[in-house]
Amino acid sequence: MSKVTTHFASESVCAGHPDKVADAISDAIVDAVLAQDKHGRTAVETLVSHDRIVLAGEINTTAKIDAEAIVRAEIKRLGYTEPAWGFSDQSPIENYLHQQSSEIAVGVDDFGAGDQGLMFGFASNETPEYLPLPITLAHALARAIDTARESGTLPYLRPDGKAQVVVRYEDDKPVAVEHVTIAVPHDEKVGLEQVSKDVYQAIITPVLKHYGYSVSEDAIVVNGTGVWYTPGPSSDSGLTGRKIVVDGYGGYARVGGGAFSGKDPSKVDRSGAYAARYIAKNIVAAGLADKAEVALAYYIGAKEPVNFTIDTFGTGKKSQAEIEQFAHDLLTPSVKEIIEKLNLKQPIYGQTAAYGHFGKPNLPWEQLTVV
């Protein structure tokens, strides 16, 4: 019987991508609140554009934070220190943060869900990170672009950038990388031919080699239009939560309705998605299935999910009843148990703002537990 061949592409973005600048600012404010007040509530939205930063949303906390100082520190950390680029740590800030609605607080104060919504968590045994290979490689390439700039390996690169990978599957197993697209801004004095050669040798080749793959130089594209010098929000505005596919599973699994960044863990958009990933990853790591998707849904004020289902796509090694029992023994996804068992009221969210929210081994929802 002939093999069934398919292809799948995923993309990731660098930490200096405008949407990720916005996510980093929003999550830095979340962390600053939780560092002083573990019960603090945040729903922070950030807009970055040409020479402008706008904060909006709700905060309810006893913490005393300097939002403007936090914003400027994040922008500087991300490499935007050159006003000539049209966006920098000196750009004006407009702050419209205000007190959280008392109507929301009524349902949340007693461990009710902070909003209505649905969440999905996914895991696969394709990679050591228990993530699909396309998004794993895309994240690794985006991180490598940033590392090459920050370390001075390719000092002419500027903040911002994207990576996209096309993977060929045979009988649902990844077998080859067929194409890589990189977009990255750089100094005007360096020609595109040199940039492309350096990116292939210093970024693409070692990243793919680490995962046991390779791609020929004629199967890559660097800066498809041929010109990219001005990085960041001056070229393209950024918003918190606009990269939910990058933040999740690269389109390989279904996507819930809500973004993650800027939200404290009472918001099940975030904590529910982390719980679903925790359950799915442990199912796969325990050898109960080759891949698993966990679906949750809540209404505002709900203490328990109104939907909790598991799909192993025909790869289950045990009965559905046994897999579901394993999941319930691992974690009952009430809002209270998610927050307490995964210890989510701590300032850990800044590290999720770039290169995805999953696959980073030190995060609590990535831990493997023996049931």
Image (spheres, grey):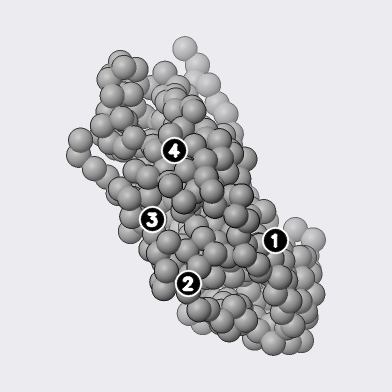
**Residue at numbered disc 1:** 239
333 or 40: nearer the viewer: 40
How far, Cα to Cα, is label 4 from label 3? 16 Å
Q: Amino acid at mark 1?
A: Leu
| Residue mark closest to the camera, 2 vs 1 | 2
Q: Residue at position x 32%, y 30% from top?
A: 327
Rendered view: 255 above or below 340? above
- Which of 101/38 is in front? 101
Position in image of residue 60 (x %, y %): 54, 64
Pick whichever of labels 2 and 4 is earlier in the sequence: 2
Q: Which mark is residue 15?
A: none
Residue wearing tag 4: 303
Of the image marks 2 and 1, the number of the one nearer the N terminus: 2
Tag 2: Cα neighbours inside 10 Å, few (<14), some, or many (≥20)? some
Q: Amino acid at mark 4?
A: Lys
Q: Is residue 204 left or right of residue 55?
A: left
Q: Position of residue 171 (x, y in %)?
A: 47, 24
Label 3: which residue?
Answer: 344
Q: Label 1 to label 4, Cα distance in Å?
A: 30 Å
Say whether marks 2 and 1 touch (CB < 8 Å). no
Label 2 amino acid? Thr
Q: Earlier in the sequence, mark 3 or mark 2?
A: 2
Marks 1/3 in contact by CB < 8 Å: the verdict is no
| Residue beneath disc 2 | 62
Is the residue marked by circle 4 packed among few (<14), some (14-19), or many (20+) residues within 10 Å? many
Distance, label 2 to label 4, CA atoms, is 25 Å
N-terminal of the two: label 1 or label 3?
1
The residue drawn where x is 64% and y is 76% is 158
Q: Amino acid at mark 3?
A: Leu
Label 3 vs label 2: CA separation? 18 Å
Q: Residue at x 38, y 22 (%)?
A: 315
Between marks 4 and 3 in the image, the one whose residue lies nearer the viewer: 4
